[in-house]
Image (tube, grey):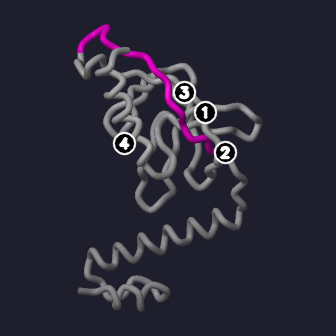
Amino acid sequence: MDNIDQQIIKERVTAFDKIEGIRVGDYIKEKDGNITRVTYIWDLENEPNQIQTGGNGGSYCLGIGHMEYSGGLNTGYLENEIKATDKRKEGKIWFFHHNYHTGHNGVEASMYFRIFEVVEISKEDTIIQDSKNKVDMLIDLALETNYNYCISCCNTIAQENQP
């Protein structure tokens, strides 16, 4: 890795570390003690994001302010099933030498990633979240279709939010 590559990785790690919350490449400590890596984050409307895992054997390409993964996948976790820790773990990444995108031009390196852990979600919390999601969807439907009344529990909110 020459000076140009060192500058590239420095700028990219700085941009990547500005991302809040969990990111592709971060680690998750599972309840059984196994450690896995985040491979993809599904941004779901009206639901907690799905954090897909399984990245212990694939490769992570560091871009400018993002990470891309190639390799095997597991089901993963909902975002509300994990919490941040104050720990970090070194992980392998790669990027293109001198930012020249061509075959056999990768530079391997490593950087530190955040560690998250799986937490217990109570049945009560799950029911509350599901109820909030359903109410939010009903309010959105009422506003999108200009209904002044969707169901009695949403009536006031829908009327207050009318243009």
Residues tagged 1 and 3 counted as in contact (Cβ below 8 A): yes
Question: What x and y, as percent, mark residue 71?
Answer: 47, 22
At label 1, which amino acid type do we have? Lys
Give, as a three-letter code, the residue at label 4.
Answer: Ala
Say whether disc 4 or disc 1 marks the residue closer to the N-terminus: 4
Q: Which stretch is magenta? A: 102-117
Disc 3 to disc 2, how far (Cα)?
17 Å
Which amino acid, by three-letter code, is at mark 3?
Answer: Gly
Instruction: Specify the amino acid type for callout 2.
Output: Glu
Q: Which residue is mark 3?
A: 91
Question: Within the image, what quadrant is residue 155 found in?
Answer: bottom left
Considering the image in quadrants, where does the N terminus appear? top left
Q: Choose the circle earlier in sequence order: 3 or 2.
A: 3
Which structural element holds mark 1?
Answer: strand
Residue at which label 4 appears: 15
Q: Residue lying furthest front in this view? A: 3
* 160 up-or-down from 35: above or below: below
Q: How far is mark 4 from mark 1, CA to CA?
A: 18 Å
Mark 3 Cα-neighbour bin, 10 Å: few <14, some 14–19, many ≥20: some
- The residue wearing badge 2 is 117
Image quadrant containing the C terminus: bottom left
**Numbered disc 2: secondary structure:** strand
**Magenta-span inclusion, residue 98:** no
Residue highlighted by disc 1: 89
Of residues 7 and 110, the one drawn nearer to the viewer in this rendering: 7
Give the class, few, some or many, for how many residues have Cα within 10 Å of label 2's Cα (few <14, many ≥20).
some
x then y, percent, for residue 159: 34, 90
Residue 85 lies, in percent from the top left, at: 65, 48
Q: Are marks 4 and 1 in contact (CB under 8 Å)?
A: no
- Examine the structure image and report whether residue 110 is included in the region drawn in magenta: yes
